[in-house]
């Protein structure tokens, strides 16, 4: 199980912390090689990630929901990209990358679906009904297309373009509010699900969006604000996310890097 | 009359809102491959119908699949829904890693490849356009590398998810190339991908839902100016 402490952590995860399934240590011994092939490879999971990435956090949340042990590898993206990352995701050169028995799976939502399909005996994030699945995919895709990009424009831009980003962000939050409705989670009957995992990592970014956009999520989208609080208490989420303050500071670092005031 | 085993609600009518779009084609080909009868509700993009706006209020785009009282927008979401909700040959492979790869490359087609093709097609001739064309060809090469050795389709012996996702490259790219006077996909540079494009276009089921390309060209030609403006904004 991932051993990081939740929002109180002040440092990014240490590199290469091994989280092995207890049996695996012996299974890796060469004389046990035949057993290794039949062993469920839940310990053959490695996640290349970046501490504050909401996309990486989706995968961490999914792994935690499924109680799947894995090796977390921090890619220090501000310093450059490792050889392993470039080889595992040559097309986009981005984290998160999940390595399963050394084979890469890329793109956070694709990784989450992969985990559902490769580990069918674990709690699934997508529901089983085809229509519910389609709706979950649609809304996760909506979060993917809209939230990060619009949020980035909020803190990168000034004047009219920023005002436009602000208007868009309010629209996005209201749309998601309508979709959530009175449900406890976006997953509805299924419970905490795919869309919750997709959107939850953005909740610590709300404070920054609020500061840059000069609005309050609680006023614009009160159900989303309540959902954010609820979801933040969930163990898998709490231990995967960093505090809003840390996110705000990180944005400050990025702005300096880009030479934005 | 026998009650259908109601696990898969195949009885309710299936309708598809859309017309003359590579995204609509994806939905149609998926339905036809699964053997699902459907009614095509042609929606002219210039005059978005009340039906479309009611069923896709978020993006206001075609295609939208209507299955009984369910409505599903987004072409690739529709394709996965059709794969899961109806019996018939599977569109996605069985192996989880292969499924993840198919989804990854489908996203690549939408997010990276088409953007690269678009700016290369519609940017004014010059040094910048040449560089964009090179970049677009590199993206085509990356896609081409996903074709399994000795197989007709990305899906292997039968059309699969990635073939459907990439169908625009086989069917619409030639039309855009003709409009723009630009060649990006050619036998000399991408023999395997061209071979795939011909196989895909010639498939019996695909032909049933491929619009007449002369009509397509006539429909698209007036939009050339608009395409050039969007390409300019994208390349900026």
Image: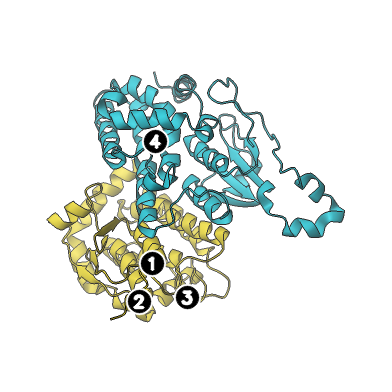
Q: Which percent across, then down, holds residue A190? A: 42, 47
Quarter holding the C terminus of chain B? top left
Cβ–Cβ under 8 Å for marks 1 and 4:
no
- Disc 3 and disc 1 in contact, CB within 8 angstroms: no
Tell which subunit mark 4 falls on.
A
Tell me what hue chain B is rendered in: yellow
**Can you identify the residue that label 1 sits on?**
B7
Please give the residue where the numbered disc 4 appears in the rendered image: A148
Which lettered chain is shown in cyan? A
Q: From the viewer's perspective, tell me whether residue B27 is left or right of residue A28.
A: left
- From the viewer's perspective, tell me whether residue B135 is left or right of residue B149: left
Instruction: Determine whether B161 is above or below B114 in the image.
Output: below
Mark 2 or mark 1, whichever is nearer to me: 1
Q: Secondary structure at mark 1?
A: loop
Q: Mark 2 or mark 4, which is nearer to you?
A: 2
Q: Secondary structure at mark 2?
A: loop
| Residue at image coords 28%, 39% | A181
Q: Position of residue A20 (x, y in %)?
A: 71, 41
């Amino acid at each position: 199980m991932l051993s990081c402490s939740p929002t109180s952590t002040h440092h990014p995860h240490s590199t290469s912390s091994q989280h092995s399934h207890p049996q695996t240590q012996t299974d890796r011994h060469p004389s046990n090689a035949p057993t290794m092939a039949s062993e469920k490879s839940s310990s053959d999971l490695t996640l290349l990630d970046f501490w504050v990435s909401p996309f990486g956090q989706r995968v961490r949340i999914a792994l935690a929901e499924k109680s799947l042990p894995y090796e977390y590898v921090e890619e220090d993206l501000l310093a450059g990209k490792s050889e392993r990352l470039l080889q595992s995701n040559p097309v986009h050169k981005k984290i998160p990358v999940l390595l399963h028995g050394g084979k890469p799976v890329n793109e956070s939502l694709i990784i989450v679906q992969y985990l559902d399909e490769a580990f069918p005996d674990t709690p699934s994030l997508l529901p089983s009904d085809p229509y519910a699945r389609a709706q979950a995919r649609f809304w996760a895709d909506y979060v993917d297309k809209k939230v990060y990009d619009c949020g980035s424009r909020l803190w990168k831009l000034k004047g009219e373009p920023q005002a436009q980003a602000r208007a868009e962000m309010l629209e996005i939050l209201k749309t998601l509010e309508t979709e959530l409705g009175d449900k406890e989670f976006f997953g509805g009957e299924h419970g905490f699900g795919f869309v919750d995992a997709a959107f939850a990592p953005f909740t610590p970014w709300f404070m920054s969006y609020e500061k840059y956009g000069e609005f309050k999520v609680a006023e614009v989208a009160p159900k989303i604000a309540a959902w954010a609080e609820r979801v933040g208490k969930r163990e898998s989420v709490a231990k995967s996310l960093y505090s809003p303050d840390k996110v705000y500071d990180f944005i400050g670092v990025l702005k300096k890097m880009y030479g934005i005031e | 009359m026998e009650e259908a085993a109601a696990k898969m609600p195949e009885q309710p009518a299936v309708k598809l809102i859309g017309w003359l779009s590579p995204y609509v084609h994806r939905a149609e080909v998926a339905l036809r491959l699964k053997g699902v009868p459907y009614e095509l509700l042609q929606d002219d993009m210039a005059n978005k119908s009340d039906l479309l706006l009611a069923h896709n209020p978020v993006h206001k785009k075609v295609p939208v699949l209507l299955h009984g009282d369910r409505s599903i927008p987004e072409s690739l979401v529709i394709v996965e829904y059709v794969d899961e909700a109806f019996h018939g040959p599977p569109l996605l492979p069985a192996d989880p890693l292969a499924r993840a790869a198919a989804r990854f490359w489908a996203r690549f087609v939408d997010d990276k490849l088409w953007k690269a093709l678009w700016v290369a097609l519609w940017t004014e001739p010059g040094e910048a356009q040449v560089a964009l064309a090179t970049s677009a060809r590199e993206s085509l090469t990356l896609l081409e590398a996903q074709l399994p050795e000795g197989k007709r389709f990305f899906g292997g012996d039968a059309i699969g998810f990635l073939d459907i996702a990439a169908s625009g490259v086989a069917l619409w790219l030639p039309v855009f190339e003709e409009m723009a006077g630009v060649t990006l996909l050619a036998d000399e540079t991408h023999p395997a991908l061209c071979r795939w494009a011909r196989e895909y276009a010639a498939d019996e089921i695909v032909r049933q839902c491929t619009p007449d390309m002369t009509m397509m060209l006539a429909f698209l030609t007036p939009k050339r100016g608009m395409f050039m403006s969007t390409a300019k904004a994208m390349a900026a």
